[in-house]
């Protein structure tokens, strides 16, 4: 697919440390969140004790399906110099059959089986047939989308949304899953584009995401048209105005489950909330705070932490990701390598359009 590069007033040379931060942030969120996955409630004491003990741990913390699939997204974008849906689908399939025990959702195996049998001849068809033709509304598209934000740093918004949608449609076709992946990708790209890592205007950040989602959910601006992601962004904005919001209220209103709608906005809130201290998480490093806060909400902890970790890593840059976490989490050197390759690809795309 030909990439449309828009030259505008925005900085066109993304910082490599932000690229590395995004992909490494996503990996450590996945690896460290996996320990608590599926716990409905995470006790603060248990969380803090676990992370304190982790300081002396040397054992590798393994990544799950989130990272396994994100690696395929990154590899395919790099090797094909853009989106080649069939190539990406076949990478998902080979990765799944190579290591099926990475914690993939139960229904995804049927999609991979059909893709394998058909040789990915129509890479969108098996997912479209899921759930009586409704498609999955899970967060499996959003959990792996972050490398797309690096590739699409300079794409037009329309182009970026199309790439995110097509990558998601290989496994998830329900509108909630598609919009969720687009929201996650947009949020990571916004975080990459922020140059002041000490001050983030959260209202502007949310407003930009709202504009994107409004265009996707209700392009004709119809009255009473459902726009569930815009509604969640409103909730995030309201929560951020309050001094404190109880975890149970965050979970009740934003969610912590495996649906895209019940997890992507939550990840955005985790990132934005953790810009400021959180009273029960005694961490001065805001990247660490983001990961611990995301996990403290329980539920789909690896995916919410990987999505929040991608935004936080993109914003704070690689050196804020604790070195020890980088040392013990599986797949960090590869994430750095993919980030570098995507950075080069992005620069090459810019040069080819000059
Ligand atoms: Mg997972």
Image (cartoon, rainbow, N blue to C red):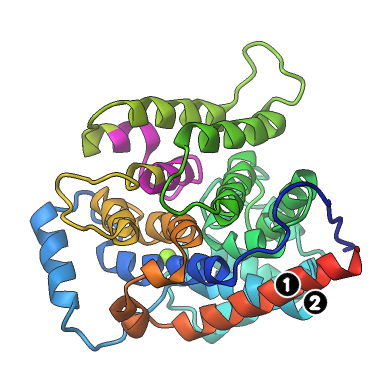
Where is residue 229 drawn, in percent x and y? 54, 33
Is-magenta flag for residue 269?
Answer: yes
Q: Residue at x 66, y 56 (%)?
A: 168
Where is residue 257 drawn, in percent x and y? 38, 47
Residue 93 or 11: which is nearer the viewer? Answer: 11
| SS type, badge 1 | helix
Crowding at mark 1 (Cα within 10 Å: few <14, some 14-19, many 20+): many
Residue 87 sits in quarter: bottom right
Q: Residue at x 63, y 53 (%)?
A: 172
Can the viewer see residue 121 in this picture? no
> Among all residues in the image, which is located at the extreme bottom?
58
Q: Residue at x 50, y 51 (%)?
A: 196
Please say if 11 is above or below 320: above
Rendered image: mark on residue 77? 1
Residue 186 or 223: which is nearer the viewer? Answer: 186
Q: Residue at x 48, y 56 (%)?
A: 315
Q: Are marks 2 and 1 in contact (CB under 8 Å)?
A: yes
Q: Does the beta carbon at disc 2 come under 8 Å from ligand 1?
A: no
Image quarter (top left, top right, bottom left or bottom right) of the C terminus: bottom right
- Quarter containing ligand 1? bottom left
Q: What segment is highlighted magenta in the picture?
A: 250-271
Please say if 102 is above or below 193: below
């Amino acid at each position: 697919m030909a990439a449309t590069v828009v030259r505008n007033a925005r900085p066109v040379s993304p910082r490599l440390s932000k690229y590395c931060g995004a992909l490494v942030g996503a990996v450590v969120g996945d690896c460290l969140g996996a320990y608590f996955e599926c716990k409905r409630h995470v006790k603060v004491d248990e969380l803090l004790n676990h992370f304190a003990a982790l300081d002396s741990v040397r054992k590798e913390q393994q990544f799950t399906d989130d990272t396994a699939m994100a690696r395929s997204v990154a590899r395919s974008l790099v090797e094909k110099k853009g989106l080649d849906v069939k190539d990406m689908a076949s990478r998902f399939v080979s990765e799944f059959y190579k290591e099926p025990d990475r914690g993939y959702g139960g229904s995804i195996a049927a999609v991979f089986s059909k893709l394998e049998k058909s040789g990915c001849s129509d890479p969108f068809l098996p997912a479209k047939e899921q759930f009586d033709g409704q498609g999955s509304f899970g967060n499996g598209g959003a959990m792996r989308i972050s490398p797309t934000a690096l590739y699409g740093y300079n794409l037009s918004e329309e182009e970026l949304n199309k790439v995110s949608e097509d990558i998601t449609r290989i496994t998830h076709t329900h509108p909630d899953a598609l919009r969720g992946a687009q929201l996650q990708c947009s949020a990571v790209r916004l975080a990459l584009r922020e140059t002041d890592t000490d001050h983030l205007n959260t209202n502007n950040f949310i407003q930009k995401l709202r504009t994107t989602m409004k265009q996707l959910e209700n392009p004709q601006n119809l009255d009473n048209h459902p726009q569930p992601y815009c509604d969640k962004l409103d909730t995030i904005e309201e929560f951020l105005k309050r001094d404190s919001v109880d975890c149970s209220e965050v979970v009740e209103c934003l969610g912590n489950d495996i649906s895209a709608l019940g997890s992507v906005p939550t990840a955005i809130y985790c990132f934005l909330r953790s810009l400021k201290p959180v009273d029960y998480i005694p961490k001065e490093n805001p990247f660490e705070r983001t990961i611990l806060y995301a996990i403290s909400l329980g539920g789909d902890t690896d995916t919410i932490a990987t999505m929040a970790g991608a935004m936080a890593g993109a914003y704070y840059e690689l050196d804020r990701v604790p070195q020890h976490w980088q040392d013990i989490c599986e797949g960090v050197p590869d994430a750095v390598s993919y980030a570098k390759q995507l950075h080069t690809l992005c620069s090459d795309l810019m040069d080819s359009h000059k």
